[in-house]
Image (cartoon, helix red, strand yellow):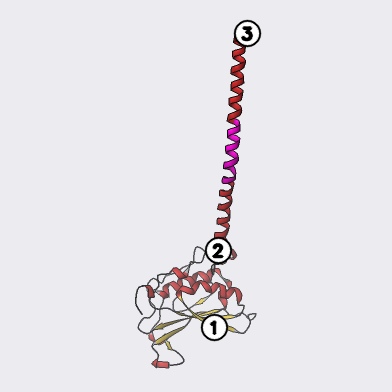
Amino acid sequence: MSIGLRLTNRTFLLACIFSSLVVCLFILTNSRIQPSYKSHILSLRITTVNEEANQSKLPGYFVQYEHPVPSNISYCNFHYGLPLELKYSTEDEEYGPEMGPNSPYRILYNIITPKIDSNVPGITYATHMTSTFMRYVPELLRYWDGMLSIAAFVPEIDAAFVISQLNQFCYCLPGMSRVSFHFVYHKDIPPSKKYVYFTKPTSCKVDDSSKFDTYSKFYDD
């Protein structure tokens, strides 16, 4: 009887020791893994925050937050049949002010015209760009309170890219009511009338215009 009790006690003692060792190993292992896991999660959070911060620095990124839903009305006065189509003839074209009829370039003035507001300062900011810089238009409106006049160089398909983003801006940015917009192009490479049919946009998230497959990417100068 005493032998049986001693065996039982030894078995119980061994079981306790074994269980204690297992628990200790688990605690030690977990204490090593846990900081690594926490570091990984922290790293993911930092990466996400950094990516968001980098995104917020992109031109026009603010539009989707300040105006998440397109307006039911356009803030722009479109002309030449836009934004549903682009209709113009040689009679609508004008020459540059320097060379006149000798210039190889043509201008379509007032693709869009402003909706005049008497409260807008009288000084007009004038600039020019290509289709790849369209994303900067919201930034101009963001930091300039007066009238804005923009001339865009639009050979061939570039016109469709510009009109597409103009149409989006006109539904998403009230400041577009201060903008007049003009097309400039070489007489041998006029703006294409293809691919122009734009209705109310579904989003105010601005596309990265620097990634557009523009005319210059397909053809040599």
The count of marks equals 3
Dot 2 or dot 1, earlier in sequence: 2
Q: In the rendered structure, which segment of residues is drawn in magenta? A: 23-36
* Circle 2 or circle 1, nearest the eye: 2
Locate residue 96: give its quadrant.
Answer: bottom left
The picture places residue 131, in percent across and down from the top left corner, at 45, 75
Name which of mark 2 and mark 3 comes first in the sequence: 3
199 or 22, nearer to the observer: 22
Label drawn at residue 72: none
- Residue tagged 2: 54
The residue tagged 1 is: 126
Image quarter where the N terminus lies is: top right
Say what secondary structure mark 2 lies in. Answer: helix
- The amino acid on which the numbered mark 3 sits, given as a three-letter code, is Ser
User: Label 1 to label 3, Cα distance in Å?
Assistant: 106 Å
Question: What percent of the width, then of the height, locates residue 50?
Answer: 57, 59
Q: Nearer the viewer, residue 121 or 90?
A: 121
Residue type at the position of mark 2: Asn
Quadrant (top left/top right/bottom left/bottom right) for the C terminus: bottom left
Whole-percent x and y of residue 166?
A: 49, 73
Q: Which mark is residue 2?
A: 3
> Neighbour class for label 1 at 10 Å: few (<14), some, many (≥20)?
few
Image height of 215 relative to 107, above or below? above
Q: CA distance from mark 2 to mark 1?
A: 29 Å
The kind of secondary structure element at disc 3 is helix
| Magenta stretch contains residue 109 | no
- Residue 65: % across, % down: 58, 63
Any magenta on residue 26? Answer: yes
